[in-house]
Image: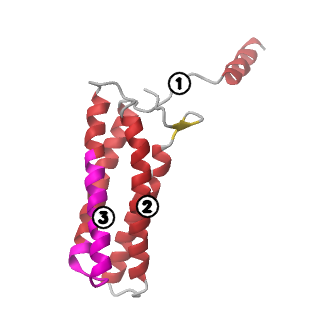
Amino acid sequence: MQTKAAIERHPIHPMLVVFPIGMWVFSLIGDIVLRAGGNPAWAPAVYYAMGIGIIGALAAAIFGVIDLFSIPQGARARNLGYWHLGINLAVTILFIVNFYLRSVGPPVSLTPFILSIVGVAALLVSGWLGGEMVYVEGAAVASAQKPPAREEEERLKKAA
């Protein structure tokens, strides 16, 4: 089940998901630092990290949808993919709301902090589903064929 959204057989979606995941986890860590009495300069860092995460999520989603529709209908991986997509869409909306609340309210507020905790927890579930799709079901994985040069190299070693 190879994806059409790839560069040199490397799927693009997993290359991009590190940005929203990293930014949103960083924003939660920044929230924790702020709530523990840390430097108030963390507030803008949290805010901008969240915004970068939203942009990254939208970019990753484009390639994730292409990957999803590369999976044959009726396959377990496709069903998992719909759940993965739905959770990620909910998480992205949650962080958009979180970002908005931070833009109109005080930098340290309980509601955005709770939204960050829920969002990162949901990312864990979605990440598990994505891993299940790839590592168990083989979604968006190229065939295990070796490149022709590698096959020739191994053939020559065996002949020697």
Residue 64 sits inside the magenta stretch: no
The quadrant in which residue 135 appears is top left
Outermost residue on the top side: it is: 159
Work out whether 5 lies above or below 22: above
**Distance from the alpha carbon under mark 1 to that under mark 3:** 38 Å
Name the residue tied to disc 3.
95
Residue type at the position of mark 2: Gly
Q: What residue span does the magenta drawing correspond to?
A: 86-113
Q: Could you say where residue 143 lies in the image, as x and y percent from the top left?
A: 51, 24
Q: Could you say where residue 86 lies in the image, as x and y percent from the top left?
A: 25, 46
The quadrant in which residue 93 appears is bottom left
Q: Residue at x 37, y 40 (%)?
A: 65
Q: Residue 4 vs residue 111: left or right?
A: right
In terms of depth relative to the viewer, which is nearer, 49 or 97?
97
Q: Residue at x 24, y 63 (%)?
A: 118
Name the residue tied to disc 1.
144
